[in-house]
Amino acid sequence: MVYAAGAGSGYRYLPGVGQYSAGVVADPAYGIVRVQFPAPVPLRAAFGAAERIIGGAGRPLTALCSWELRSPRPFTESSFTAFNAEYIALLDEWGVIGTSGANPVARSNVCPTVDPVLEPSAHAFAFTVPAQAGTVQYVVSGSAESPEGLGDYRDHMVAYQDMSADGLLAKVRFVTAALKSRMDGLGVSGHPPRVVQVYTIHDVQRLLADAVMAPLRCADSVTWHPHRPPVVDLEYEMDCRSVGAEYLAGSGGIAG
């Protein structure tokens, strides 16, 4: 079941865990704009840049609907909990966290292996804008090969520390099923994603057509990032989206 986000947000969200919702879908009179930074920006500075961009578009901060984060290296369970508390505090400063404590904002968080970041940073964010009725627009949060909300990741990882062909296939299938479930929950399963992002350092190219693109009905784009998921021993993460416009911060009509 989806819930309305904050006042003026222009979107609904599928509940997830404390650090992020499972995904967001724009209200009928709204669309979603994604803004990517030319290079990852340290997290607090990225929030400042997003505040200027969202305000410059005439939208309230509650229009923020997703973040794509980058971290220096995979966290331990305890350090991930500490990071998430800091991140949620930033959202709370914006008034995004609901009075019940629910977090409506979608998120992915991965660790680049090529040109890694030095501190937690942001790669991109998205927010809603008024739009004429048209395509259904949404962002599904990143999922790795472990169920959420069970207390820890390690004890529930699919094919734990198994990087064999069968192990990788099990991981990919689990994550694809998780994204499909989130799309069902958002009510967007009839609208295939325009972009699927795959995050792993392992060779999974041979699996993508049958285990990702076909189940998600994604015929347009799968983007591979040589990044690790955010917690030690997780090996495969994926998110997907279908948004109305994408910009590079500081170019065109989007100021950084």
Image (cartoon, rainbow, N blue to C red):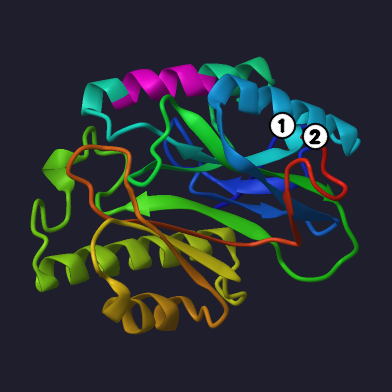
| Residue 50 - label | 1
Q: Specify whether 230 is left or right of 163.
A: right
Give coordinates of residue 58: x percent, y percent: 91, 35
Q: Residue furthest front?
A: 115
Q: Specify whether 10 is left or right of 195.
A: right
SS label for mark 2: helix
* Residue 196 visible here: yes
Residue at 18% x, 66% y: name it. Answer: 168
Q: Residue 82: say if magenta.
A: yes
Quarter holding the C terminus is: top right
Q: Which residues are magenta?
A: 80-88
Q: Residue 252: say if magenta.
A: no
| Amino acid at the residue labelled 1 | Ala
* Residue 99 visible here: no
Q: Specify whether 230 is left or right of 188.
A: left
Residue at 82% x, 54% y: name it. Answer: 30
Give coordinates of residue 251: x percent, y percent: 80, 47
| Amino acid at the residue labelled 2 | Ile
Q: Quarter-wise, where is residue 90 in the image?
A: top right
| Residue at image mark 2 | 53
SS label for mark 1: helix
Q: With respect to residue 66, does 195 lie above or below?
A: below
Circle 1 residues within 10 Å: few <14, some 14–19, many ≥20: many
Residue at 72% x, 47% y: name it. Answer: 11
Give coordinates of residue 34: x percent, y percent: 69, 50
Q: CA distance from mark 2 to mark 1?
A: 5 Å
Q: Main secondary structure of the magenta part?
A: helix
Label 2–label 1 contact, CB within 8 A: yes
